[in-house]
Amino acid sequence: MDWFSPAQCLGYVAFVLGVGCFLQTDDRRFKWFMAGECLAYVLHFGLLGNPTAVASSLISLTRSLLSLRTRSRWVAAAVIAANLGMGLALAHRPSDWLPLAASCLGTLALFTLQGVAMRLLMLCGTGLWIANNLIVGSIGGTALELVIAVINLSTIVRLLRRPANAAG
């Protein structure tokens, strides 16, 4: 394996953007970082030849960008429907639904919640990704999601400690 191939380098970019995403206390910056992470993953998985991961990342990219413009429950429902459709087309065993459920939780979080509540629901999705990555034996994916969980928890604590009138 070439640790510095273009595909792997894009994976590292996605990792950095994912960590940066969950460090954000401003919801808009959070969503922009998440969109960047998803774009890097689209390119990463494309170069690795994994079309289902590309499709999932494209849905997540679209979701992140849409959530910057609207909080429409109809748009959230459409994104969730796309995830479920992808699951019906691609899932072969119960554990295949873990990342799809994580994506659905992320969609609900981004479109319907803010601040700590949004991050708590995203944390639940991270837990599903950790379970998925452990099941499939993804060491790097598990490490990434564990780091994201710790950073997200840290950001939640920072938000809870911040005075109620502090913004962004």
Image (spheres, grey):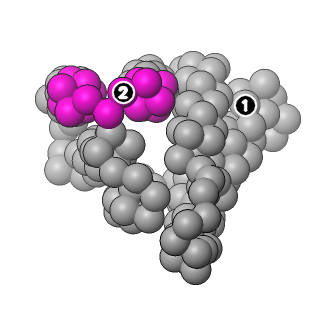
Number of other residues with Cα within 10 Å of mark 2, as a class: few under 14, some 14 to 19, many 20 or more: some
Pair 1/2: label in front: 2
The quarter in which the N terminus is drawn is top right
Circle 1/circle 2 CB separation < 8 Å: no
Does the magenta run of residues contain 76?
yes
Left or right: 56 as drawn, with respect to 45: left
Q: Position of residue 59 (x, y in %)?
A: 39, 25
Which residue is drawn at the image coordinates 19% and 38% (left, top)? 92
Residue 112 or residue 86, whichever sits in front: 112
Q: Earlier in the sequence, mark 1 or mark 2?
A: 1
Q: Secondary structure at mark 2?
A: loop
Residue 167 in sight in this render: yes
Residue hosting label 2: 70
Which residue is drawn at the image coordinates 25% and 25% (left, top)? 75
Residue hosting label 1: 10
Residue 57 in sight in this render: no
* In the depicted structure, whether residue 71 falls above or below residue 113: above
Which segment is the magenta one? 64-80
Q: Amino acid at mark 1?
A: Leu
Residue 163 or residue 133, whichever sits in front: 163
Which residue is drawn at the image coordinates 62% and 53% (left, top)? 168
* In the depicted structure, whether residue 111 falls above or below residue 101: above
Left or right: 98 as drawn, with respect to 142: left
Quadrant of res 49: top right
Q: Position of residue 94 (x, y in %)?
A: 17, 50
